[in-house]
Image (cartoon, helix red, strand yellow):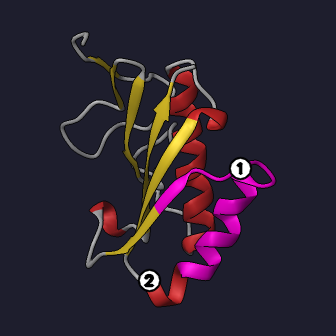
């Protein structure tokens, strides 16, 4: 097993905590959960509503994937965290599946949580695999 590598992606949003955007070991790439923050201005207000926040989160994850030379085709597993699970699940799913369908879908877990950084409504992380 090789030592892990840790990557910060210049185009991706500034992390809201002390972590790397991605960590890789033996071809497995773990992307830190992304928030709906603006990659250009991390002080900008978060988008309104879970649909807009989900789009921003997915776009931020795509920036991180690109920064490590991968695409959505390499995503194996997804974890989604929602602060308003019952209210926002359907709206989040409508946006989420627009990024993956009609391709085979990665494995996924969706969890209701009591709070997220910056009072976000959604956070998503990925596990990807290099070919």
The span picked out in magenta is: 89-108
Image vertical order of residue 91 relative to residue 45, above or below: below
Quick check: is 37 in the magenta stretch? Answer: no
Q: Which mark is residue 104?
A: 1
Mark 2 → mark 1, Cα distance in angstroms: 24 Å
Q: Residue furthest right?
A: 102
Q: Residue furthest front?
A: 1
Indicate the secondary structure of the residue bearing disc 2.
Answer: helix
Residue 19's spot in the image, x, y percent?
A: 23, 35
Residue in the picture at 49% in, 20% down: 68
Left/right of residue 45 with respect to residue 74 in the rendered view = left
Residue 9's spot in the image, x, y percent?
A: 43, 23
Label 2, residues with CA under 10 Å away: few <14, some 14-19, many ≥20: some
Residue 101's spot in the image, x, y percent?
A: 77, 55
Q: Which sits in the foreground, 30 or 37?
A: 30
Image vertical order of residue 51 relative to residue 61, above or below: below
Quick check: is 103 in the magenta stretch? Answer: yes
Residue in the picture at 26% in, 79% down: 114
Label 1, residues with CA under 10 Å away: few <14, some 14-19, many ≥20: few
Left/right of residue 63 with respect to residue 97 in the rendered view = left
Give the residue at mark 2.
85
Residue in the picture at 52% in, 21% down: 130
User: Nearer the N terminus, badge 2 or badge 1?
Assistant: 2
- Among the 4 quarters of the image, the one containing residue 13: top left
Q: Which mark is residue 28?
A: none
Indicate the secondary structure of the residue bearing disc 1.
Answer: loop
Q: Nearer the viewer, mark 2 or mark 1?
A: 1
């Amino acid at each position: 097993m090789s030592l892990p590598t840790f990557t910060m992606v210049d185009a991706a949003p500034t992390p809201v905590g002390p972590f790397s955007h991605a960590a890789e070991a033996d071809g497995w790439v773990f992307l830190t959960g992304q928030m709906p923050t603006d990659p250009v201005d991390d002080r900008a207000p978060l988008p309104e509503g879970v649909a807009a926040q989900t789009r921003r989160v997915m776009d931020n994850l795509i920036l991180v994937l690109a920064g490590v030379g991968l695409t959505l085709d390499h995503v194996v597993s997804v974890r989604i965290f929602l602060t308003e699970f019952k209210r926002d699940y359907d709206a989040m799913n409508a946006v989420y599946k627009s990024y993956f369908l009609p391709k085979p879908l990665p494995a996924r877990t969706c969890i209701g949580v009591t709070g997220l950084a910056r009072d976000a409504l959604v956070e998503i992380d990925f596990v990807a695999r290099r070919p």
